[in-house]
């Protein structure tokens, strides 16, 4: 069982000064992507790639996850002068042939229109696209894993709130990966959700060094301000972790918790023993 994706890396050359204020690179790129996609793609393609909706419930409650996440935390509080190069990554879970082309056209258009508070323009220099989708194995590794460290690199919000217990962390990762597979891949994860959740709850949180990060974004469409904060830091877990490690490692690409499209909930996992 795998989770398949295209990790796309977009390279630009600044034509004007481009500034990414602290805490806002993901919001700038996501908002600009939506505007650009509307201009270069048809309404059906825009809805599929940027604003998928479910017919089963009201917007915001039952809408499916978007088929991409941004990875741009390295742009935080950076300014690029004309002629300087910058790049960011987009993990794309929609593997249909025209999806990569649509994102390429959209980011080229965003660069032409300008990005950041001053609408600085850029030129899309190239896009790194793997020849085949990357396949993240979700099956247990051959060796036993008893302890791992999770580094929460961007603000992460899990429900219920509090220290990131492993049962909660795995449940949110499992649900997100299974949903992405169901919508954009071969189908939901073929595991016993309840039994796996009970086993995950038996894993202990043995070290927790996290801090709360306050952040917010302003909707360019409505002008409303929305909280985007969460916690960052490190947590270590101990127990029978072998079956769960591939899922937590895959969350480096998918994110976990809320606001993953913007780049929140990025976790890096290290096997300790």
Image (spheres, helix red, strand yellow):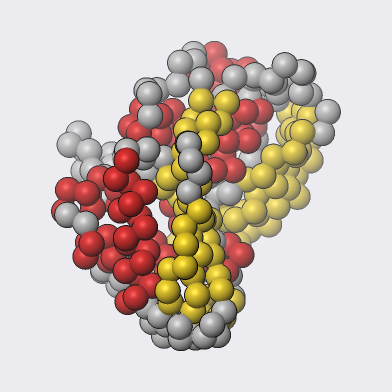
Q: How many marks?
A: 0
Out of 226 and 87, give the one closest to the viewer: 87
Direction from residue 61 to residue 179 in the image, left or right: right
Q: Quadrant of residue 267?
A: top right
Rendering coords of residue 254 (x, y %) = 51, 42
Residue 230: x percent and y percent?
Answer: 56, 55
Residue at 37% in and 64% down: 107
Residue 102 placement (x, y as % from top left): 30, 53
Task: Report the residue that reaches farthest toward the right.
Answer: 273
Depth check: 212 or 254 in front?
254
The residue nearer to you, when weighing 172 against 248, is: 248
Inspect this view and state whether residue 224 appears: no
Instruction: Answer with the quarter of the image where residue 124 lies.
Output: bottom left
Left or right placement of residue 29 versus residue 96 in this view = right
Residue 16 against residue 248 in the figure, above or below: below
**Residue for point 32% across, 60% down:** 105
Task: Please tell me which residue is depicted at 51% across the width and 65% down the height of the picture.
Answer: 11
| Quarter of the picture holding the C terminus | top right
- On the image, the x and y values in percent for residue 16 come to 46, 86
* As drawn, 115 above or below 244: below
């Amino acid at each position: 069982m795998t989770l398949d994706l295209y990790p796309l890396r977009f390279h630009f050359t600044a034509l004007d000064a481009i500034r990414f204020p602290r805490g806002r690179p993901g919001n700038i790129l996501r908002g600009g992507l939506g505007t650009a996609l509307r201009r270069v793609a048809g309404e059906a393609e825009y809805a599929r790639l940027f604003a998928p909706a479910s017919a089963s419930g009201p917007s915001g409650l039952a809408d499916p996850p978007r088929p991409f996440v941004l990875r741009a935390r390295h742009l935080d509080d950076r300014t690029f002068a004309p002629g300087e190069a910058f790049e960011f990554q987009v993990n794309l879970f929609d593997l249909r042939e025209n999806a990569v082309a649509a994102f390429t056209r959209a980011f080229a258009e965003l660069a032409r229109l300008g990005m950041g508070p001053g609408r600085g323009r850029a030129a899309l220099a190239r896009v790194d696209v793997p020849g085949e989708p990357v396949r993240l194995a979700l099956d247990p590794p051959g060796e036993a894993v008893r302890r791992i460290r999770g580094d929460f690199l961007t603000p992460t919000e899990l429900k219920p709130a509090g220290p990131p217990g492993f049962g909660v962390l795995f449940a949110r990762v499992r649900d997100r990966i299974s949903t992405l597979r169901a919508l954009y891949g071969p189908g939901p994860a073929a595991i016993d959700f309840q039994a796996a959740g009970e086993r995950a709850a038996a894993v202990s949180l043995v070290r927790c060094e996290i801090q709360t990060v306050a952040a917010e974004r302003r909707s360019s469409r409505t002008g409303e301000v929305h909280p985007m904060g969460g916690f960052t830091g490190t947590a270590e877990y101990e127990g029978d972790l072998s079956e769960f490690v591939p899922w937590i490692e895959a969350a480096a690409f998918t994110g976990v918790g809320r606001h993953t499209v913007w780049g929140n909930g990025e976790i890096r996992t290290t096997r300790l023993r």
